Amino acid sequence: MDARQLKVEAARAALAHVSDGMRLGIGTGTTAEEFVRLLAQKVATGFTIVGVPTSERTAILCRELGVPLSDLEETPELDLTIDGADEVDPELTLIKGGGGALLREKIVAAASARMIVIADRSKMVETLGRFPLPIEVNQFGLRATEIAVGAAAAGLGLSGPVTLRMTGSQPFVTDGGHFILDASFGRIPDTRALSNALHAIPGVVEHGLFIGLASAAIIAGGDGIQTVHAARKPGSSTDHDVA
Ligand SMILES: O=C[C@H](O)[C@H](O)[C@H](O)COP(=O)(O)O
């Protein structure tokens, strides 16, 4: 099975958790897009859901395929969010934001009673950090924020290049109008400490560590589907908690 087929299988397994009438957070990225395609097929047969997209990109695909949409103003509490991830560890702490949607994704996940992550097995790691950590920052004071991010990491014994994400010759701009710094710190043994340190920097809008948000991960591999459940009650401890 190729990588795309694995994403489709994870998305298909997640669809089984979607019930008629649900208020659904809809993620961003290539895996989430496979979910949208399958969801649209179900909607076409009369299945009723309302979706809150986590990016303009996802909203466009949903509209094209006829998936009914709402937003968090109209529908501030969601039953379930289905989203992809860049890395997933055994505790279901995630790195997200490879597609630049981490801020809206985190807001939507936090507004959901449950979050199910869908991914192919290549995203499972023992310790997060192989994938550079996306950090969404205000455009104002970019250089100062970049230096503060490096210093915060150094305080935790982490180091590595922090680079401004580009699209061609221009900085990548998120749906919220911010920039993204990609931080290649390598292994992140204490995700909560890094989360707290990054949140203490005024120019940091949000970061791509999702702690305590995922309830389950549906992981597709060549040998089938594995569902990993979170050990703790989701929402009881989030990445905004002080350690
Ligand atoms: O900002 C993008 C998101 O966090 C994506 O969910 C993540 O990058 C995974 O994307 P993909 O399914 O394309 O690997």
Image (tube, rainbow, N blue to C red):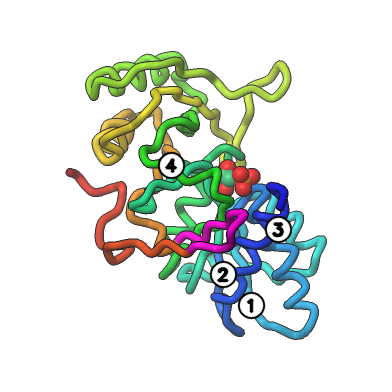
Residue holding disc 2: 24
Q: Which residues are magenta?
A: 217-226
Are the residues at dot 1 and dot 2 in contact (C-beta closer than 8 Å)?
yes
Does residue 213 appear anywhere in the picture?
yes
Magenta stretch prevailing secondary structure: strand
Q: Residue at x 46, y 58 (%)?
A: 109
Q: Secondary structure at mark 2?
A: strand
* First along the sequence among labels 1 and 4: 1
In-front residue for pair 104/233: 233
Percent of width and height locating residue 197: 27, 31
Mark 3 vs mark 4, CA separation in Å: 22 Å
What type is the residue that disc 2 sits on?
Answer: Leu
Tag nearer the camera, 3 or 4:
4
Q: CA distance from mark 1 to mark 3?
A: 17 Å
Q: CA separation, marks 2 and 3?
A: 15 Å
Amino acid type of the residue tagged 3 in the rendering: Glu
Q: Earlier in the sequence, mark 2 or mark 4?
A: 2
Instruction: Check disc 1 and give the amino acid type.
Output: Ile
Q: Position of residue 166 (x, y in %)?
A: 64, 22
Question: What whole-number distance in Å separates the C-alpha atoms at marks 1 and 4?
Answer: 33 Å
